[in-house]
Image (cartoon, helix red, strand yellow):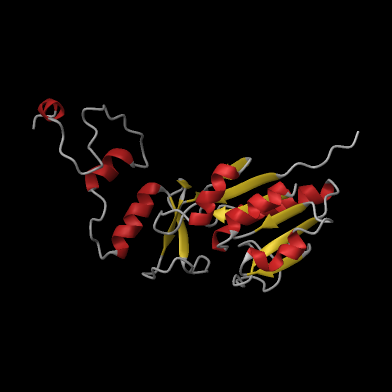
Amino acid sequence: MYHEQRGHITLVTGPMFSGKTTELLRLHGRQQLAGKRCVLVKYAKDTRYDENLIATHDKHKSLSNTIKANELQEVYGEMFDEAVDVVAIDEGQFFSDLADTCERLMRARKIVIVAALNARFDRKAFEQVALLQPNANEITLLTAVCDCGENAIFTHRKSAATEEELIGGKEVYKACCRECYYKAESEMHDGENIYPKKMVDDFFMTSTRLHISPEKKPRLDGRPLSPRTASKNGH
């Protein structure tokens, strides 16, 4: 019995160098094996490894049907073509119309796969990715490998540039665990202690996991301890 395809959104997210594009291409290839008609969407300004094809950091390229765009609305004709079953979008965080377009594609019964960064270099959310998350059927959070060997969940920018969109590879970014991210950010500010040392020591030691009782846990909102808590801590 024939069942009409239902719309579906999969979001693959994580820091730089976590394998998001690799996973996007794997899922895309799986849909092709299932006989689905697929199209890949590449951010036009991302020409790091290839001008026309989607490529991973290790230079693996997809030779499938790929279209380039600065805004997704530029390629609505290709994506909403009745012959297309699956739309896979790489570097989703750079498209200002990502969330709305994915909603429209899903309502048109397309299978949508998006690869996007989980956060900016300053750990703030990409607006379009944040708007897409509540509408996704499935979210896969990947981690990279920090220089210290721990799982990396943050992206540190090596330069002092502050613009949101700065396309680059290992020459510009590195993936960090929480402790190494804090250290790298402090070094970027000429050794300025931008994160309280006690916060780092208490919560983010890589060699052990500390159990901190509620009364000893420092407040992170800057408010003073309550008299009861302060007395327990000897203040």
For the C terminus, which image quadrant? top left
- Figure disc tally: 0
Is residue 129 left or right of 194 when viewed as pictured?
Answer: right
Tell me if residue 49 comes above or below residue 5 in the rendering.
Answer: below
- x and y, in percent, of residue 77 in the image: 75, 64
Tell me if residue 194 comes above or below residue 43 in the rendering.
Answer: above
Mark yes or no: residue 85 visible.
yes
Is residue 41 left or right of 232 when viewed as pictured?
Answer: right
Mark yes or no: residue 60 visible.
no
- x and y, in percent, of residue 12 in the image: 60, 49
Q: Name the residue at 39% across, 69% down.
A: 159
Q: Name the residue at 21% across, 27% down.
A: 215
Tell me if residue 77 comes above or below residue 129 in the rendering.
Answer: below
Is residue 37 left or right of 88 when viewed as pictured?
Answer: right
Which picture quadrant has residue 58?
bottom right
Q: Name the residue at 33% across, 59% down.
A: 185
Q: Between residues 105 and 61, which one lies in front from this camera angle? A: 105
Which picture quadrant has residue 202?
top left
For the N terminus, which image quadrant? top right
- x and y, in percent, of residue 39 in the image: 76, 59
Is residue 101 left or right of 183 when viewed as pictured?
Answer: right
Of all residues, the one furthest to the right in this rendering is 1
Q: Between residues 3 and 113, which one lies in front from this camera angle? A: 3
- x and y, in percent, of residue 177 in the image: 42, 49
